[in-house]
Image: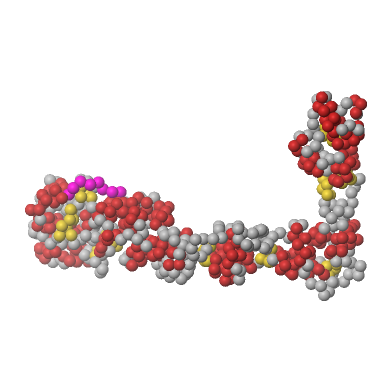
């Protein structure tokens, strides 16, 4: 036991201030004398040396952790570890005497403490970024200290006692900002300032507020060294308010600060973020800042087309972006054609941009390259199928082969994008057409075109029978490539054509016999008044509308057109219309829909029935 008189730690008190009060409480005029008498290394204590702090704890007979938790551990570069965070030297004012005069006056009047050992330092006083006393809402004052008694707060204040009235006057009223409260709370171990800041160390969080705030308020090319203290206070608070929102606030700040000049995509981080990037890249070397740099880099690469090879906190090798030029090189397509294809594929939104290249996500580019390499023109599709180009054209017109996209031209430019077809789908179609063909077959079997003509079907109807597996008789001639070598038994095809089960009346005959206009026929079928359906008749190249004789007579017995009635009665259409109007006979269907007069026969005059 040494018999040292112990003093308690006070609110926000750092270890060096505690040693200053401990020295006074034990009769030493200053810390230098106290350490000499106790055999302690003053410089090691001020530097937060764990072994030396342990020696003092042993003298006081208390756990060393109680002292070390309040220590400021100085690193080799002159920075310090405070509250678990590494602060570079430029962020602190440890070589200056900073304090709130009114807090010191309150200390002097606190009779609960030992006289001479009442004054103490508050941890936030060493941070120039916190210029306001939260207790008295006044400015913290700063003056040069005496290097002989550095960090000995009581001795330093005693040396300037005569200047104290001036110090009080110099401490003018001001309100603390939200940023300053953030720093004090984090020094006290309190979090709750948004997900983004809470996941950064205090030093990195403070730097983020400052760097982003300066760029947000004064522009990305603003230099912090050229701004006044008041402007810096405003910038830090602005940055804090944005970052306190959380990750969304951080990302929104980056979006607002970032250059929109697309040429910056080639120049990298400094072109995009100016002095913000430069400061983080050159002035904040501690690994604690790697996380911030990584977050900026990751979000930017996701949002902005920064290409591989540029500098962005190191050379970019993992960019998720690429250029249209790279796709053109990979596919061999001309620039204009390629851009139009990329627009149609949904990978870019316009053909032109003001400057620079057009950029796309690398994943989208890979998809585009695969799909573009799979594209075939109509001529190439015909070559794959082994059919004449005109035959393939008819297959396309009839819907058997669908284009990937179709374009009749691009704006007012003399340019047209040809139809493209999936090469792999065309190859699959060829395989399906040929896979069941026999190499031996009767001589009377004929090719596709002749077979379709003989049975009165479209080419696609015959090919559909092949794809559906309905044809058993299918041959493949030697010496003819692809589907052109297919041979068909047209009699088998004819036998498979559905024969009408009952007598049918075709559309043309219906209109002729009823004197019905095409518009009226379409409307009546669409509304179900005319019972017609599309059927594939043997004599037709395509399905046609037909109705049974029974349904025809049922309609004819109920409705009649003015033209048909005029012919039956030998009365002019105009005269017939006036007569029907006088009798109050309504039109059966709207004139604007059927384009001709149609009435129900039940409204006719008795002599007309």
Q: Answer with the quarter of the image where residue 300 lies.
A: bottom left
Residue at image coords 36%, 59%: 220
Q: Quadrant of residue 352?
A: bottom right
Q: Please tell me which residue is depicted at 19% across the width and 64% down the height of the picture.
A: 45
- Judge whether residue 372 can be spotted in this image: yes
**Can the viewer see residue 81?**
no
User: Residue 314: x and y, percent?
Assistant: 41, 69
Residue 413 shown left or right of residue 97 in the figure: right
Foreground pick, 1 / 468: 468
Who is closer to the viewer here, 188 or 420?
A: 420
Please provide percent x and percent y for residue 58: 19, 62
Q: Residue at x 25, y 58 (%)?
A: 69
Where residue 434 appears, as percent x and y from the top left, is 79, 67
Magenta: main secondary structure: loop
The residue stretch that appears in magenta: 171-178
Q: Position of residue 190 (x, y in %)?
A: 31, 51
226 relative position to 252: left or right: left
Q: Quadrant of residue 75?
A: bottom left
**What residue do we see at 68% from left, 66% from top?**
376
Relative horizontal placement of residue 428, taking residue 530 as reference (left or right): left
Queried whether the magenta region covers residue 175, the answer comes back as yes
Which residue occupies the extreme bottom position in the image?
479
Magenta stretch holds residue 512? no
Q: How many marks?
A: 0
Colour scheme employed for the rendering of this structure = secondary structure
Seen in the image, is 257 located left or right of residue 496?
left
**As drawn, 597 above or below 380:** above
Q: Quadrant of the N terminus?
A: bottom left
């Amino acid at each position: 036991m040494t018999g040292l008189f112990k003093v308690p730690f006070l609110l926000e008190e750092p270890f060096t201030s505690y040693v200053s009060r401990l020295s006074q409480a034990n009769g030493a005029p200053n810390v230098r004398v106290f350490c000499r008498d106790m055999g302690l290394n003053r410089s090691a204590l001020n530097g937060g040396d764990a072994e030396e702090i342990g020696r003092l704890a042993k003298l006081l007979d208390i756990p060393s952790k109680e002292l070390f938790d309040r220590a400021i551990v100085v690193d080799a570069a002159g920075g310090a570890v405070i509250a678990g965070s590494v602060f570079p030297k430029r962020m602190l004012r440890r070589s200056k005497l900073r304090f709130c005069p009114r807090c010191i006056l309150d200390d002097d009047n606190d009779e609960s403490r030992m006289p001479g050992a009442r004054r103490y330092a508050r941890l936030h006083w060493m941070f120039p970024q916190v210029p306001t006393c939260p207790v008295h809402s006044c400015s913290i004052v700063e003056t040069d200290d005496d290097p002989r008694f550095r960090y000995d707060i009581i001795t330093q204040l005693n040396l300037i006692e005569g200047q104290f009235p001036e110090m009080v006057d110099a401490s003018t009223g001001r309100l603390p900002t939200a940023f300053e409260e953030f720093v004090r709370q984090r020094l006290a171990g309190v979090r709750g300032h948004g997900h983004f800041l809470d996941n950064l160390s205090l030093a990195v969080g403070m730097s983020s507020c400052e760097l982003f705030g300066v760029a947000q308020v004064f522009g990305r090319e603003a230099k912090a060294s050229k701004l006044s203290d008041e402007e810096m206070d405003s910038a830090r608070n602005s940055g804090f308010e944005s970052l306190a929102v959380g990750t969304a606030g951080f990302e929104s700040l980056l979006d607002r600060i970032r250059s929109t000049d697309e040429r910056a995509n080639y120049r990298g981080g400094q072109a995009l973020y100016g002095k913000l990037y430069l400061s983080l890249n050159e002035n904040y070397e501690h690994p604690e800042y790697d996380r911030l740099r990584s977050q900026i880099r990751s979000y930017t690469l996701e949002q902005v087309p920064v290409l591989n090879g540029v500098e962005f906190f190191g050379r970019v090798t993992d960019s998720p972006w690429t250029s249209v030029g790279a796709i053109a090189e990979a596919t061999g397509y001309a620039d204009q054609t390629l851009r139009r294809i990329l627009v149609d594929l949904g990978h870019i939104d316009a053909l032109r941009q003001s400057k620079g290249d057009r950029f796309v996500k690398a994943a989208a580019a890979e998809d585009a390259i695969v799909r573009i390499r799979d594209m075939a023109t109509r001529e190439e599709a015909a070559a794959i199928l082994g059919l004449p180009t005109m035959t393939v054209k008819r297959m396309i017109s009839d819907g058997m082969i669908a284009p990937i996209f179709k374009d009749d031209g691009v704006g007012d430019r003399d340019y047209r994008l040809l139809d493209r077809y999936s090469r792999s789908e065309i190859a699959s179609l060829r395989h399906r057409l040929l896979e069941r063909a026999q190499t031996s077959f009767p001589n009377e079997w004929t090719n596709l075109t002749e077979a379709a003509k003989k049975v009165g079907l479209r080419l696609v109807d015959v090919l559909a029978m092949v794809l559906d597996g309905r044809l058993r008789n299918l041959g493949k001639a030697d010496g003819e490539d692809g589907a052109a070598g297919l041979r068909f038994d047209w009699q088998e095809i004819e036998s498979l054509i559905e024969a009408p089960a009952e007598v049918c009346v075709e559309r043309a005959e219906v209109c002729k016999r009823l004197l019905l206009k095409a518009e009226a026929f379409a409307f009546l079928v669409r509304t179900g008044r005319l019972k017609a359906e599309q059927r594939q008749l043997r004599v037709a190249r395509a399905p046609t509308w037909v109705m049974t004789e029974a349904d025809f007579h049922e309609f004819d017995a109920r409705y009649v057109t003015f033209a048909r009635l005029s012919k039956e009665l030998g009365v002019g259409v105009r005269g017939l219309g006036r007569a029907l109007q006088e009798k109050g006979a309504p039109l059966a269907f709207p004139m604007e829909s059927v384009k001709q007069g149609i009435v129900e026969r039940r409204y006719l005059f008795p002599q007309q029935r």
